[in-house]
Image (cartoon, rainbow, N blue to C red):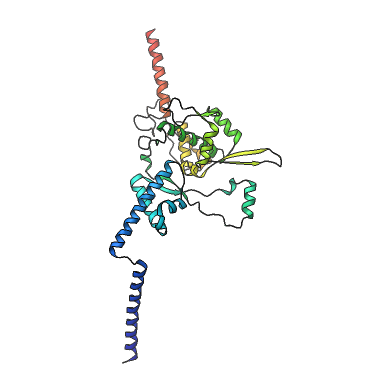
């Protein structure tokens, strides 16, 4: 037999042997019959559902969705399937709940005290590049993120939840517009102007016996939930200390710069050229076409849906109603 034919037959035989080895390897790695594959797929689907429930439960209590928690409480024996389970859970969260898990930013080194920085410099461990913690955020289009569709969750009461969201949104907006950090005396002055220096609204306003909460208690809750960060360190070698407030990791995700800009526009009753220029300088947000509406306008361009005219429209409505009542009184005289 010619050498070329022997080589050709040998090559064919080698290919067949390689195919057999690959098939044998696949059987060893998989080792599952079709029924076992179906059972494994069903276990993965159940794990995905468990992860979705775990994420929703964490978000309800404003607890970060930690990767370690997912492995310990959800994955169990399916620990090696993290990427597959996480991706499917994300898909289910988006399709069913209009939300997705977003990773929290890592701790900003600039927010460490001098002592913490010294300890970190002495440590030989590498600084973490990811937080391995997540929170749920909405992925709904802007036209669906109105109060009529996304109402406050009823942790204790809808009104109490709305008050709490308004409080931390206001504080985060003030800190952000102050350059990212705010001294404790300045924060207290802002709270005094809002009549919140001592007490804040109760989280359960439906209960008439529920007392208002102390401001420090509410601020401490915001720190625990990641909305705020408080850094205290000594100015000098003496006992004098300086406390500065910053926006926490959850606060950066929930109340980003676009949300702060929207909050400012609502406070000022709309947008204008001057306001948009100031927002561009302070927040570097996307440009928005100014929408100016005055006292004669019946409805703001971005007014909330029927049933909730919005704060600026409510103020104008009360003013117009008061003027009409005065005119009626003059006519009666």
**In this rendering, is residue 40 above or below 295?**
below
Along the horizontal axis of the image, is 234 left or right of 82?
A: right
Location of residue 250 with respect to 301 vertically, above or below: below
Q: Residue at x 64, y 42 (%)?
A: 233
Residue at horizontal 40 percent and vertical 23 percent from the top:
317
Measured as percent of width and height from the top left, residue 225 is found at: 49, 41
In the rendered view, would you say 233 is above or below 69? above
In the rendered view, tell whether residue 89 sits above or below residue 175.
Answer: below
- Residue lying farthest to the right in this orientation: 237
Q: Quadrant of the C terminus?
A: top left
- Return the residue nearer the eye: 72 or 65: 72
**Percent coordinates x, y for residue 172 in the rendering:** 51, 38
Residue 272 visible:
no
Give the residue displayed 34% in from the left and 73% down from the top: 24
Observer-nearest of 215 and 42: 42
User: Going by the image, does 218 lie left or right of 51?
Assistant: right
Residue occupying the far left of the picture: 35
Q: Horizontal placement of 185 versus 226: left or right?
A: right
Camera sees residue 16: yes
Q: Between 281 and 120, which is closer to the camera in this rendering?
A: 120
Q: What x and y, as percent, mark residue 33?
A: 29, 65
Q: Residue furthest bottom?
A: 1
Q: How many marks?
A: 0
Q: Quadrant of residue 123?
A: bottom right
* Foreground of the two, 30 or 109: 30
- Residue 159 x %, y %: 42, 31
Q: Residue at x 33, y 46 (%)?
A: 96
- State which quarter of the image contains the N terminus: bottom left
């Amino acid at each position: 037999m010619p050498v070329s034919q022997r080589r050709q037959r040998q090559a064919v035989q080698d290919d067949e042997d390689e195919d057999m080895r690959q098939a044998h390897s696949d059987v060893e790695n998989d080792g599952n019959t079709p029924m076992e594959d179906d059972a494994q797929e069903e276990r993965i689907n159940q794990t995905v559902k468990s992860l979705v429930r775990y994420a929703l439960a964490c978000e309800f209590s404003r607890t970060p969705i930690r990767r370690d928690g997912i492995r310990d409480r959800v994955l169990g024996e399916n620990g090696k399937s993290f990427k597959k389970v996480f991706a499917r859970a994300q898909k289910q969260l988006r399709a069913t709940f209009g939300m997705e898990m977003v990773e929290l930013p890592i701790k900003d080194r600039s927010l460490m005290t001098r002592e913490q920085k010294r300890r970190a410099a002495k440590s030989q461990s590498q600084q973490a590049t990811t937080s391995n913690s997540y929170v749920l955020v909405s992925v709904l289009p802007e036209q669906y993120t109105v109060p009529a569709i996304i109402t406050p969750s009823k942790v204790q009461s809808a009104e109490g939840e709305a008050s709490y969201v308004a409080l931390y949104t206001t504080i985060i907006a003030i800190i952000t517009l102050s350059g990212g950090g705010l001294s404790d005396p300045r924060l207290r002055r802002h709270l005094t102007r809002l009549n919140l220096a001592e007490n804040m609204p109760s989280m359960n306003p439906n209960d008439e016996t529920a007392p208002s909460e102390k401001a420090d208690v509410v601020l401490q809750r915001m720190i625990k939930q990641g909305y705020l960060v408080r850094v205290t360190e000594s100015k000098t070698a003496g006992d004098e200390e300086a406390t500065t407030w910053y926006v926490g990791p959850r606060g950066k995700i929930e109340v980003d710069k676009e949300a702060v800009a929207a909050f400012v526009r609502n406070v000022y009753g709309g947008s204008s050229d001057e306001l948009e220029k100031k927002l561009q300088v302070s927040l570097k947000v996307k440009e928005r076409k100014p929408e100016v509406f005055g006292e004669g306008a019946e409805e703001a361009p971005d007014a909330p849906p029927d049933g909730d005219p919005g704060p600026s429209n409510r103020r104008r409505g009360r003013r117009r109603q008061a003027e009409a009542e005065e005119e009626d009184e003059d006519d009666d005289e």
